[in-house]
Amino acid sequence: MRTRIITAIVGLCVLGVVLAFFDTVIFDLVLSLVCLLAIHEVFAAMGFGKKQWWLYALAVPFTLLVMLSTSEGVRALVLPAGFLTALAYCIMLIAHAKTLDFGKLSSFVYFGGVIVFCFYSLIHLKRALPHTQFGYDAVYFILLILCFAWGGDTAAYFAGRAFGKHKLAPFVSPNKTVEGAVGGVVGSMALGALATAVYGYISGRVTALTVEIGLRHLAVIALMGAVASVLGILGDLFASAVKRQAGIKDYGTIFPGHGGILDRFDSVMFIAPFVSIAVRYFFYHLR
């Protein structure tokens, strides 16, 4: 537990430093690096090694194009690059039909796509809510995503230890309980509302939709927290199911006491796209 706490504190400090460069390309590059590390963890989990290095190498250029697509010129290359990448994987399967397992390749490509979708959602928030127009709203929503995910995880852990009796998914994750999941939902809702209140107090506004935070706005955030918590649980269980089938305990060792990138960001995988979609299509039209 001590190691986990120290790692969490160091991680939060690093997060603070990265967010300090939010309005620069450094933020995009750091997210790109984290995304590529997560994809490599899936590459290793599927049993691929140095002999199949080209499978991972094919994913790198397309991932970088997507993650750095705040530039209009780069965005123009994403579609053709995506087509060529998919075509290359098909050709590689044909060329290595005797040795390359289609199931493992498909799992690597699919899981890699989910990871890119997750981290790109954070880049999308930066692009959709430029600092010059919306202040630090994009930073607020990114922190809200992390509050929903990690706050829900923490609340679920303690609620499960205190009240857990009914197993949620015993084969996939034996330690998760229904009571813990309920605690996680409540924790995400509460922490999301608290983060919103703090941001509103500091900035004087939350988004372009309101000048002061009212009960209606907090209710919307709480509802988002409830949905996000469920999505976080699904992301966690999905990553755990893959680990079970791959026969591994953790995706990596980059975070002592926590595991790899995916062991720490599994609950963020589906929350980040959800919040980004809500912001893009609904949030700023709320009146």
Image (cartoon, helix red, strand yellow):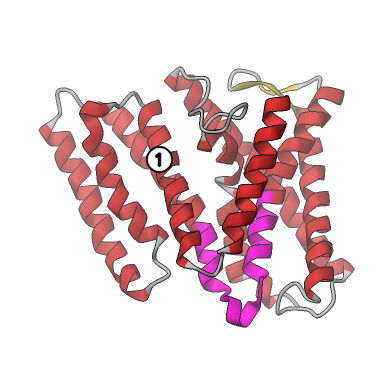
Q: Nearer the viewer, residue 37 or 90?
A: 37
Relative image position of residue 30 (x, y in whole percent): 47, 54
Q: Which residues are magenta?
A: 121-146
Relative image position of residue 194 (x, y in whole percent): 83, 56
Where does label 1 land, which residue? Answer: 39
Residue occupying image coordinates x 70% and y 44%: 229
Residue occupying image coordinates x 76% and y 29%: 178
In the rendered structure, does residue 46 fall within the stretch colored magenta? Answer: no
Residue occupying image coordinates x 36% and y 33%: 43
Q: Nearer the viewer, residue 66 or 82?
A: 66
Q: Quadrant of the N terminus?
A: top right
Relative image position of residue 134 (x, y in whole percent): 64, 78
Q: In the rendered view, does 133 fall on the left or right side of 109?
A: right
Q: Quadrant of the C terminus?
A: bottom right
Q: Is residue 14 visible?
A: yes
Residue occupying image coordinates x 34% and y 69%: 75
Q: Amino acid at mark 1?
A: Ile
Count neighbours of disc 1 (C-alpha within 10 A) and say few if under 14, some if 14 to 19, many if 20 or more: many
Q: In the rendered view, does 271 fall on the left or right side of 27?
A: right
Question: Residue 151, located in which quarter of the rendered image?
Answer: top right
In the rendered structure, does residue 136 fall within the stretch colored magenta? Answer: yes
User: In the displayed structure, would residue 233 be above or below residue 146?
Assistant: above
Total residue callouts: 1
Relative image position of residue 74 (x, y in whole percent): 32, 68
Q: In the rendered view, does 273 fall on the left or right side of 70?
A: right
